[in-house]
Amino acid sequence: MSIAITNTLLEKTRSLSIEETLAFLANEFKDKVVFSTSFGQEDQVITAIIGQNDLPITIFTLDTGRLFQETYDVFHKTLKKYKKEIKVYFPEASKVENLLNKKGPNSFYESVENRKECCFIRKVAPLTKALKGNEIWITGLRAEQSENRNDLDLFEYDEKFDIIKFNPLLKWNLEEVQKYIDDNNVPQNALHKQGFVSIGCAPCTRAITPDEDIRAGRWWWESSHKECGLHQKQ
């Protein structure tokens, strides 16, 4: 059934622009459409489209408790510019307390298993709560961001979260993202001008050099798929 729905959505929106597609989804699924933002470049493009067109789509973010101050700065500027609520979901305090009490504040550096445990508590569990009861999840994913995202579809069923995911910027390149931001005066994380392309938690993100992969700055100390569990296919 879910595959049939994704195919139907793809067919109905094939000739529509991103703005028109978002408006169609908001009308078709009413209050069951949500957009998750971490205030990166791609997410800011989608927030701008939603805000400028006053679309009835819920925007939410996950505050892990370990974000950069620059991320909070662009969060604040975005609220001021578009006058649209951004719901915030935090990790469960007792889970974070238990993790730090047992393993300390930097356990994620010690193993991939520990890092994924931290990501699950701070990101995956809150996301599960944010997506519950919704039908469409809009993301800022792009195919060129990582090898793991090369095989994504415009519309796809996410079995892990039991929701249909819409990736409107899937085929955009980074230059197109930046051009939209510049042309529309969209608030941007100051770290992007300092070599940070993909921005997550402060302890887990570093700037990259021009010859490095886009995701090289995430969990740079480990060899993995560079995913936290939010968008990794099962």
Image (spheres, grey):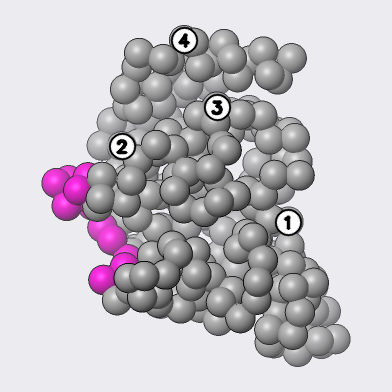
At label 3, counting other C-alpha atoms closer than 10 Å, the crowd grade (few under 14, some 14-19, many 20 or more) is many
Q: Quadrant of the C terminus?
A: top right
Mark 4 / mark 2, whichever is N-terminal: 4
The residues bearing labels 3 and 1 have C-alpha atoms spaced at a distance of: 23 Å
Q: What residue would you read off at disc 1?
A: 125
Image depth: mark 1 or mark 4 in front? 4
Q: What residue would you read off at disc 3?
A: 155
At label 2, counting other C-alpha atoms closer than 10 Å, the crowd grade (few under 14, some 14-19, many 20 or more) is some
Mark 3 / mark 1, whichever is N-terminal: 1
x and y, in percent, of residue 188 in the image: 28, 61
Q: Amino acid at mark 1?
A: Ala
Residue 151 located left or right of residue 46: right
Mark 2 / mark 1, whichever is N-terminal: 2
Q: Which residues are magenta?
A: 179-193
x and y, in percent, of residue 92 in the image: 73, 65
Residues at circles 2 and 3 in contact by the CB criterion of under 8 Å: no
Quick one: which residue is furthest to the left in this view? 183
Front residue of this view, candidates 5 and 113: 113
Q: Which mark is residue 49?
A: 2
Question: Which of the 4 image quarters holds residue 180?
Answer: top left
Image depth: mark 2 or mark 3 in front? 3
The residues bearing labels 2 and 3 have C-alpha atoms spaced at a distance of: 18 Å
**Magenta stretch holds residue 189:** yes
Our reading of the magenta stretch's main secondary structure is: helix
Residues at circles 3 and 1 in contact by the CB criterion of under 8 Å: no
Q: What residue would you read off at disc 4?
A: 12
Q: Amino acid at mark 4?
A: Lys
The residues bearing labels 2 and 1 have C-alpha atoms spaced at a distance of: 28 Å
Question: Which of the 4 image quarters holds residue 168?
Answer: top left
Mark 2 / mark 3, whichever is N-terminal: 2
Relative to 213, say whether 48 is above or below.
above
Residues at circles 1 and 4 in contact by the CB criterion of under 8 Å: no
